[in-house]
Image (cartoon, rainbow, N blue to C red):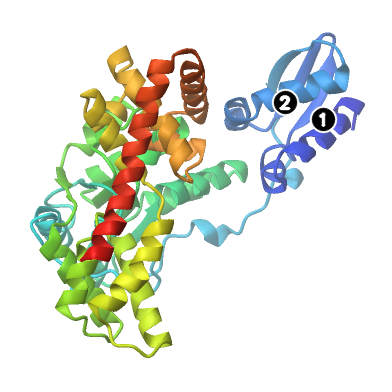
Amino acid sequence: MNELHNALSRQLKAVVPNEEFQAWFQPVSFSVENDEAVVSVPNRFYEAWIKDHYLETLEKAIRTAENRPLKLRFEIKPLSPEARPKIPAEKYKTSEPGQSTLAARYTFNNFVIGPCNELAHAACLSAAERPGKVYNPLVLYGGAGLGKSHLLHAAGHLIKQRNPNAKVHYSSLESYTNELIDAIRTEGVASFHNKYRNMDCLLIDDIQFLAKRERTQEELFHTFNTLFEAERQIIMTSDKLPREIHGLEKRLVTRFEWGLLADLQPPEEETKIAILQNKALEKGIELPRDVAFLLAQQPETNVRVLEGYLNRVIAVSRHKNRDLSAELVKEVLVPLLGERQITADEVMKLVSHEYGVRVADITGAKKSRDISLPRQISMYLIRRLTRLSYPEIGRLMGGKDHSTVVKGVKKMNGLMEEDHEFARKLRNVEKKLMEQSRRRIGELTES
């Protein structure tokens, strides 16, 4: 190996996590030709990925290694068969009838139906009873913890129950993307296609993460067409409507909306109570209604968070050998709510109210000042008041790049230093969010 290759490898290993280095730089070689630093990659996908994720890191490493300006040039140099990463062939086999990627705990039998989700439930049930014939594709959309994934798995279980030989596959969008990356790296794309394009039912969770993933969108587009034309059932979930996913190709938006779009809304109090009682019964516990009522009164719309509260109350009840009661709930919840972080949803709702815009505008693609300012304020407050990272905030903001969030936060910091009136208004918004959180704790203590 040449000196540049060795020097760059050492520098990159120091700043790139080992797993990422092995995946993206181990198969790459570096050399110098005149005033150019040549990066030899196995295929175009490597080139695009390195440019998207590591270009600045790579350019900095080259400047340090050579101590002179070099123009960066990529060239395609396929790996020899011996040098190609190996991956078990069975990774891309289609699921056998006895195998399943479905979560056993999610069925129609234990799904609590209410006004907030009855359309989505009915649509999933119909699609599972007549796969590929009605509501194809079916897209379930709504906020986190409202039951989208539950219905996705439940539909898969019913299809398998009615036809044990049916090839039903569940995958999160993140897993689908990672599997595609492995297939490209190991030249297993043909097997990947064979696996996904021969399903009787394909269930994809969280398609909002398709935003700006061009190669994944390309693959899913062709897989979708193949399955749809063969009348195979496709069910997907998203936290927003396909047309609201910033960076999603129009041809995919169109196809995702060919069938039925069914939304799930936050559960009202009665449905929350029923869900909590059902969750308790699964654990062999009959939950008193006053306990369920007190838990359901909490402002959380995410059922998983409510279930977490329930689990904590049950655990304390067993540990201290105390009956489940409203008093016990108060004892457990007050410190939990005291530690509770303000959520991104709460920030965006209050900012939208204060600045007279919709939450959908804050997370959308519009760039006018009346929208961009509330959006940047939301980024700043979410970063300040929650544990969310820049990339996580970017995804909440409609799939924006983390660098956009960084710039937005920096801009707000600068404005606060320059404009004292703006700083005062922003501190007031932050104060209102903190007061909301403290008020909830006070209401629980006094009830």
**Three-letter code for the amino acid on which mark 1 is drawn:** Leu
Would you name the residue on which mark 2 appears?
Answer: 58
Q: Residue at x 31, y 32 (%)?
A: 245
- Quadrant where the image shows the C terminus: bottom left
User: In the rendered picture of this protein, how many numbered marks are placed on residues?
Assistant: 2
Can you give x and y, in whole percent of width and height, for residue 175 in the image? 46, 51
- Quadrant where the image shows the N terminus: top right
Q: Is residue 199 left or right of residue 20?
A: left
Q: Nearer the viewer, residue 182 or 110?
A: 110
Q: Residue at x 41, y 34 (%)?
A: 381
**In whole angstroms, how far apart are the C-alphas of marks 1 and 2?**
8 Å
The quarter holding residue 329 reads bottom left
Q: Earlier in the sequence, mark 1 or mark 2?
A: 1
The quarter holding residue 217 reads top left
Q: Residue at x 24, y 59 (%)?
A: 443
Asked whether disc 1 touches disc 2, contact meaning CB atoms under 8 Å apart, the reply is: yes
Q: Which mark is residue 290?
A: none
> Is 275 drawn above or below residue 191 in the view shown?
below
Asked whether residue 364 is in view, the answer is yes
Q: Nearer the viewer, residue 172 or 223?
A: 172
Q: Which mark is residue 8?
A: 1
